[in-house]
Amino acid sequence: MDITKDIRPLTEFKRDTARFVSHLKESGRPSVLTVNGRPELVVIHAQAWQEVQDQLDYAAAVAGIRKGLGQIRDGNGVPASAFFEEFATHTAE
């Protein structure tokens, strides 16, 4: 984020919302909106927001895989055959 371009007063956003929306679409960067000179809100284009969410989901999946691999490395794993046998037993009940 470029501080000089992406931090603006809320009143400016309210005065020229169409220009802000256009800027958000073009830049893909969020804008920080201030009230009385203090940051209050962050506005981001929906597509950019979805990209951020996708990156967070990916990072969470990678972290989960790493955790599982670490557990297996530490000897805390269960063989798949044993898991599926127990799973079948509990779902049949």
Image (cartoon, rainbow, N blue to C red):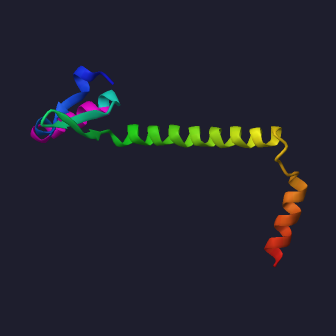
Taking the image as shown, residue 71 lies to the left or right of residue 20, namely: right
Q: How many marks?
A: 0
45 is higher (above) or lower (below) than 29: below
Q: Quadrant of the N terminus?
A: top left
From the viewer's perspective, tell me whether residue 23 is left or right of residue 51: left
Q: Quadrant of residue 14?
A: top left
User: Which residue is depicted at the point 85% across and 52% down?
Assistant: 78
Q: Which quarter of the image is occupied by the C terminus? A: bottom right
85 lies above or below 9: below
Residue at (36%, 43%) from the top-left corner? Answer: 46
Examine the image and state in which quarter residue 11 appears.
top left
Q: In the rendered structure, does residue 26 fall within the stretch colored magenta?
A: no
Residue 81 x, y percent position in the rendering: 90, 56
Q: Tell me residue 22's x, y (percent).
A: 24, 34
Residue 36 percent coordinates (x, y): 12, 36
Is residue 23 highlighted in magenta?
yes
Seen at 86% across and 65% down, the residue is 86
Give the residues in magenta.
14-25
| Residue at x 16% of width, y 40% of height | 17
In this picture, residue 88 sits left or right of residue 58: right
Comparing 75 with 17, the one in front is 75
